[in-house]
Amino acid sequence: MKKFLSAVVAILLVTAACASVLASSYVGNANSRKFHYADCSMVGKMNPANKVFLNTREEAIAAGYVPCKRCKP
Ligand SMILES: [Zn+2]
C-alpha cells in the first residue's frame, strides 16, 4: 500500500512539473522585444531581469514581441 501511495505521489509531481513547463512555453526579452521558445539557446544567455514568461504565441505578439530569427517560434 505504501508503494502504491508513493507511486501516486510521483505521478502527481511529474504531472505538476509538466503543467508548469507548458504554462510558459515562450520567453520574451523585455529589452530586445523578441520572444523565443523556452528551450531556445538565446533564453539561456538572456539577462534574467529581462525575461518575460508568455503562455501563448498570440499573447507574445499582442504584447508587441517579435519572433526570434533563430528558433522561429
Ligand atoms: Zn530564440
Image (cartoon, rainbow, N blue to C red):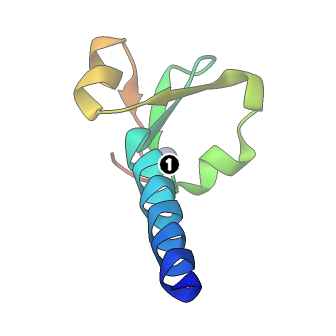
Outermost residue toward the top? 63
Outermost residue toward the left? 58
In front of the other: 2 or 69: 2
Question: Vertically, is 60 above or below 37?
Answer: above
Q: Which residue is mark 1?
A: 38
Residue found 51% across the figure and 85% down from its top: 1
Question: Vertically, is 65 above or below 41?
Answer: above
Q: What x and y, as percent, mark residue 40?
A: 53, 54
Q: Give the left or right position of residue 50, taking residue 60 as reference.
A: right
Question: Vertically, is 67 above or below 9?
Answer: above
Amino acid residing under circle 1: Ala
Residue 5 visible within the image: yes
Q: Give the left or right position of residue 44, taking residue 63 as reference.
A: right
Q: What x and y, as percent, mark residue 12?
A: 46, 62
Question: Vertically, is 55 above or below 70?
Answer: above
Q: Give the left or right position of residue 34, taking residue 73 as reference.
A: right
- Badge 1 marks a residue whose secondary structure is loop
Residue found 68% across the figure and 23% down from its top: 50
Residue 70 visible within the image: no
Q: What x and y, as percent, mark residue 32?
A: 58, 22
In front of the other: 73 or 12: 12
Q: What x and y, as percent, mark residue 19?
A: 40, 50
Q: Where the C terminus falls, by quadrant?
A: top left
Residue found 62% across the figure and 48% down from its top: 42
The number of discs equals 1
Neighbours of disc 1 within 10 Å: few (<14), some (14-19), many (20+): many
Asked whether mark 1 lies closer than 8 Å to ligand 1, one says no
